Image (tube, rainbow, N blue to C red):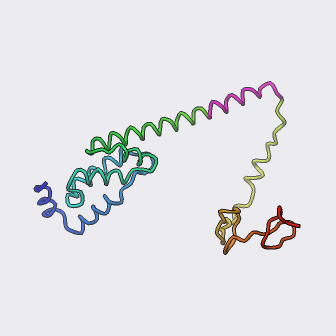
Amino acid sequence: IELKKKMADKYYPRNEMKKIETELWNLEVQGTDLTRYNQHFQELALMCVRTCPEESDRVERYIGGLPDSIHGSVVASKPKTMQEATEMATGLMDKKIRTYTERQAANKREFKDTSRNNKGRQQPPKRKDVARAYAAGSDNRQQYAWSRPLCPKYNFNHDGPCIPRCYKCNKIGHLARDCR
């Protein structure tokens, strides 16, 4: 470790080391690409001897960059070494990907089964020009941008506090079920 510190002091300028340390601190798994994260983390951790001098510091920082879907399970396993942490994370990520793939395959099988059951029935005639009509629509439409925030209570866009309004008499202070 002393040799690493001396080499880093001599061959890496201080500002470059700061950039590398910041990159290590902000490093996170992109999507499900855990292999790339593991490689990049190892490269950065080798250069950042000041930020993560102990293996326990590296393990903690490594776990911090994992996605929420596996983060808790890796923390619960309490890995003491980087190898334990990477093996645990890799196993969990593989399991997540496998279950996702199995669900997708099951959904496809369900869809195929329902389409197979409809073969004996006569399907209504399809209008072939509908797709062309949609495609021929004007391309210069502007996308609507919400100017008001979405209310989580009523799922409606409005400003200010959420005030109940009656839909029958349109008065504020009560709802339609309480209207006289």
Residue 88, image quadrant:
top left
Residue 36 is situated, as x and y percent measured from the top left of the image, at 35, 47
Identity of the residue furthest to the bottom in this view: 160
Residue 24 is situated, as x and y percent measured from the top left of the image, at 31, 58
Identity of the residue furthest to the right in this view: 180
Q: Please give the name of the residue rendered at 75% of the width and 53% of the height, measured from the top-left corner.
A: 134
Q: Please give the name of the residue rendered at 48% of the width and 35% of the height, measured from the top-left corner.
A: 98
Residue 77 in the image: above or below residue 162: above
Residue 179, image quadrant:
bottom right
- What segment carries the magenta color? 107-121
- Which of 71 and 3 lies nearest the eye of the viewer? 71
Residue 19 is situated, as x and y percent measured from the top left of the image, at 28, 65
Q: Taken as a whole, is the magenta stretch helix, strand or loop?
A: helix
- Which of 46 and 57 lies nearest the eye of the viewer? 57
Q: Is residue 72 magenta?
A: no
Q: Please give the name of the residue rendered at 20% of the width and 68% of the height, measured from the top-left corner.
A: 14
Q: Left of 143 or right of it: where is 32?
A: left
Q: Please give the name of the residue rendered at 73% of the width and 61% of the height, measured from the top-left corner.
A: 138
Give the quadrant of the C terminus: bottom right
